[in-house]
Image (spheres, rainbow, N blue to C red):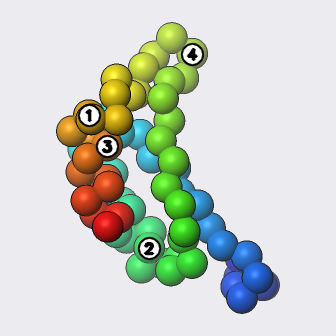
Amino acid sequence: MEREPNRLRDTSLFYPQDSQAPEKLEALVKQAPHIVATRFHEQRGKESYLDSFDDQGVMAIWKKAY
């Protein structure tokens, strides 16, 4: 990204159940303004991070991204 910022774009990845995710997204965008997408981890092994896209954590991240 740093070598070709006019050609490449970043994506971000967050855990919806992390209550600090919206603030982390805001800080990341300030550091890397070429972010064009955000993704969510649904699960890791048997541990679930996402119950639904209506989840409060998901909505908080979307509101911050918007």
**For the residues marked 3 and 4, what is the alpha-carbon distance in whole angstroms?**
20 Å
Q: Position of residue 65 (x, y in %)?
A: 35, 64
Residue 56: image quadrant is top left
Q: Position of residue 43 (x, y in %)?
A: 50, 24
Q: Amino acid at mark 1?
A: Asp
Mark 4 — residue?
45
Q: Position of residue 16 (x, y in %)?
A: 35, 39
Tell me if mark 1 has few (under 14), some (14-19) or many (20+) residues whose alpha carbon lies within 10 angstroms of its own.
few
Mark 2 — residue?
29
**For the residues marked 2 and 3, what is the alpha-carbon distance in whole angstroms?**
17 Å
Where residue 58 is drawn, which disc sits there?
3
Query: 23 and 35: which one is in front?
Result: 35
Tell me if mark 2 has few (under 14), some (14-19) or many (20+) residues whose alpha carbon lies within 10 angstroms of its own.
some
Q: Are marks 1 and 3 in contact (CB under 8 Å)?
A: yes
Tell me if mark 4 has few (under 14), some (14-19) or many (20+) residues whose alpha carbon lies within 10 angstroms of its own.
few
Of labels 3 and 4, the one closer to you = 3
Q: Residue at x 24, y 51 (%)?
A: 60
Q: Of the residues under marks 2 and 4, which one precedes in the sequence?
A: 2
Q: Position of residue 61 (x, y in %)?
A: 31, 53
**For the residues marked 1 and 4, what is the alpha-carbon distance in whole angstroms?**
20 Å
Tell me if mark 3 has few (under 14), some (14-19) or many (20+) residues whose alpha carbon lies within 10 angstroms of its own.
many
Where residue 63 is drawn, which disc sits there?
none
Q: Outermost residue, bottom direction?
A: 6
Residue 19: image quadrant is top left
Q: Secondary structure at mark 3?
A: helix
Q: Secondary structure at mark 1?
A: loop
Q: Of the residues under marks 2 and 1, which one precedes in the sequence?
A: 2
Of labels 2 and 3, the one closer to you = 3
Of labels 1 and 4, the one closer to you = 1
